[in-house]
Image (spheres, helix red, strand yellow):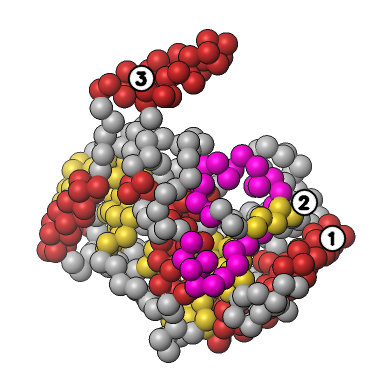
Amino acid sequence: MNSESILLLTKDACCKAYLPCYGNTYWKGKTPNLDELVAKGTKFNRFYTAAPSSNMAYLSMFTMMFPYQHEIRDYRPLPKDFSGETLFDYAKSQGFENHIMWDSDWGGTDVLYARCYGEDTTFHNVKEMRQRVGWKFPYGCHQFDEQKASAAMARVRSELESMSSSGKKIFLWCHLPHVLNGGTGYGAEIDLYDRYIGLFREFFNDDNIFLSADHGNMNGLKNKLCYGFDVYEPAVNIPLIAPRISGVQECDENISNIDYKSLIFKRQIPHREIIFSDSAYYAQPNRKLAVIYRNYRYLYNKATDSEELYDIEWDPAENYNLIIDTFYDVDRKTTAPACDYYFYPHWEQLEEIREKLRAEKNRIWREETEKMKRINAVKGWLNNHPRVKKVIMPIADKFIH
């Protein structure tokens, strides 16, 4: 591979808690490639995805825009390609040849939900890179399969060899699956993930390798697993291991994955006062928004019109909602001031923090019009009458969009 080639290697639904560099003790000593890149590079502790689901995350990270800035009303295939500059466009302007590598299942309809990959980008749709798990594929608990793992890695190696033969400098985004083929479940194949990192190190220089995720998952917080509908820390605070930037070994700045242009191509650590992470587009009823400021995380739930506020430094597990000044004691059947029973050293500054973050939420928030609500009601009816929908929707879309 050309020595200037750059790799952005992301792993789907990869929680920070899976990785030993972020405190996991089970995998400690079992990830030599990852550990070496961490020792050489910069570890980011507050790196946030703009969205806790894959296609929304892709669209944000490659268009360098938060979801609300796209003004997309709901989650469905996009009617056209993104018209502004993408990360792939910028890479091309810097003389890079763009490539994307992922599982072949993602090379189909999923592309239509982001449409931000550039006209000249070469796709490498690798067959059976992922192990199917979860409700769609109820295999249950099974054993690690070395034969499957080795076969998948051989297919990836073949693509890398083909890619590198041109001698050109390449920008490759490789997106590894939730569970690598041969693995057994989320976070259960981190040693295999490390083997993939080692494979890519054979083709890319360490000082041009960036390791991250598209999003995390709930990983048991609030008694929930999986992802896509929550903006709590495990779902949105994702790993980032970069080559050493500005001499910094460990970065505690709040940074978003819409900042890859600065991080990857300019080797600069950007500063953002406010970061957003959004679970849905503006017209969707289940939208949850996180507004991130310093060590504070303000969450707004559209469906319940409710607010949450957490100080992550004080309460990393997001246990106590600092929006609440009084609490109801279900055992004693009494109401009391929260500050009498919960020690938090900064009660006096909370009102200012609340108002600041509410103002940021209100600044970007958008509701659909009554007209659009009526249209959606009609669409709901049509979804239950597919024959009528097949005739009506192509006509309706022309007026809506």
Which three-letter amino acid code belongs to the residue tagged 1?
Ala
Q: Is residue 136 magenta?
A: no
| Mark 1 crowd level (few <14, some 14–19, many ≥20, 10 Å Cα) | some
Mark 2 or 3, closer to the camera: 3
288 relative to 209 in the view: left or right: left
How far from the left and from the top, in percent, is residue 159?
Answer: 76, 64
Q: CA distance from mark 2 to mark 3?
A: 40 Å
Q: Which residues are magenta?
A: 89-118
Q: Which residue is mark 1?
A: 151
Q: Which residue is mark 2?
A: 128
How far from the left and from the top, in percent, is residue 351?
Answer: 13, 56
Name the disc covering residue 375, or none. 3
Q: Name the residue: 55% across, 87% down.
A: 40
Which three-letter amino acid code belongs to the residue tagged 2?
Glu
Q: CA distance from mark 3 to mark 1?
A: 49 Å
Q: Is residue 97 magenta?
A: yes
Which one is in front, 199 or 124? 124
From this view, report whether residue 279 is shown above or below residue 166.
Answer: above
